[in-house]
């Protein structure tokens, strides 16, 4: 084949060779919806071609947390109203109060029982061998005690001494014991409620009701 006119002139040195410039390849058109722009880099487009540009989400991932999932802000607890007490705390306070009250009642009952025991022991110690009651006596002296009318059997001399305040009567163990006035005064110091009868010789009778003091009824 004959050389073209340009080739002949080139060989003769009349035309300088022309360099061919490389043209940049035309950008490939992006396929898919605009939402695919934010897809991860390892996802391929249809047809097996290279995927879109890598998603620049490093800073967002660091802020949002692991895996790029945004974390929801923690909701602040609603402030309690004035005077509002937590229900569990209220139950705990009530339980502590009831336990303290039970302990106080039990302690008072134990102390009272101890006092009664000590008083009974002391009363028995004072009364030991001091009772003046006699069997087979024919006199009876009545007296009020515990909202009822009680009685004690005495002889003539004991009745006179009882009405004069020289003797007294003390209740103990379901019995009414006739005692000397000095013993009655000892019992008055720690167990006055046990004294059933003691006449005060210094008492002034304001009015005479016509009933003698030594009346036996």
Image: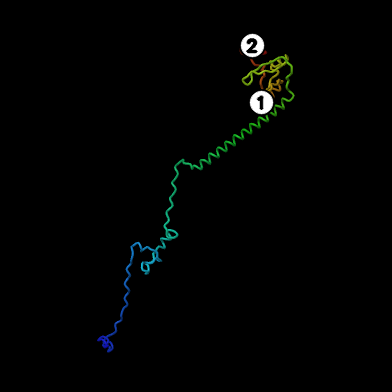
Q: In which quarter of the image is residue 15?
A: bottom left
**Disc number for residue 191:** 1
Q: Is residue 203 visible?
A: yes
- Answer with the quarter of the image where residue 136 lies: top right
Q: Which residue is drawn at 66% across and 16% down?
A: 142
Relative placement, left or right, of 85 versus 189 is left
Element on which disc 1 rests: loop
194 or 200: nearer the viewer? 194
Residue 108: give x, y in percent of width and height: 61, 33
Residue 127 screen position, x and y as percent = 72, 25
- Quadrant hosting residue 36: bottom left
Q: Residues within 10 Å of mark 1 (few under 14, many from 20)?
A: some
Label located before the other in sequence (2 or 1): 1
Q: In this view, does 131 lie above or below 8?
A: above
Crowd band around label 2 with a 10 angstrom C-alpha radius: few (<14), some (14–19), many (20+) = few
Marks 2/1: CA distance?
31 Å
Quadrant placement of the C terminus = top right
The numbered dot on residue 31 is: none
The residue lying at 66 percent from left, 18 percent from top is 150
State the residue at coordinates (66%, 21%): 196
Q: Can residue 52 be seen in this view?
A: no
Q: Which of 155 and 200 is in front in this view?
A: 155
**Residue 72: x and y, percent?**
42, 54
Residue at 30% in and 80% down: 20
Q: Label 2 belongs to which residue?
A: 211
Question: Which element type, helix, strand or loop, lies under badge 2?
Answer: loop
Q: Looking at the image, which is closer to me, 28 or 49?
A: 49
Q: Looking at this rendering, what residue extends furthest in the bottom direction?
A: 12
């Amino acid at each position: 084949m004959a050389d073209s006119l340009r080739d002949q002139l080139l060989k003769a040195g009349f035309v300088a060779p022309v360099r061919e410039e490389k043209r940049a390849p035309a950008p490939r058109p992006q396929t898919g919806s605009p939402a695919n722009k934010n897809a991860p880099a390892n996802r391929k487009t249809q047809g097996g071609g290279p995927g879109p540009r890598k998603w620049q989400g490093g800073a967002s991932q660091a802020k949002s947390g692991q895996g790029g999932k945004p974390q929801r802000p923690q909701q602040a607890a609603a402030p309690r109203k004035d005077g509002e007490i937590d229900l569990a705390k209220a139950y705990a306070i009530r339980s502590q109060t009831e336990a303290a009250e039970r302990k106080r009642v039990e302690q008072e009952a134990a102390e009272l029982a101890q006092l009664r025991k000590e008083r009974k022991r002391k009363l028995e110690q004072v009364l030991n061998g001091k009772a003046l009651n006699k069997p087979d006596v024919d006199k009876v002296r009545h007296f009020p005690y515990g909202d009822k009318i009680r009685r004690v059997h005495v002889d003539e001399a004991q009745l006179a001494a009882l009405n004069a305040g020289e003797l007294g009567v003390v209740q103990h163990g379901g019995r009414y014991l006739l005692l000397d006035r000095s013993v009655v005064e000892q019992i008055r110091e720690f167990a006055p409620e046990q004294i059933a009868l003691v006449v005060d010789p210094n008492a002034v009778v304001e009015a005479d009701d016509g009933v003698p003091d030594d009346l036996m009824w």
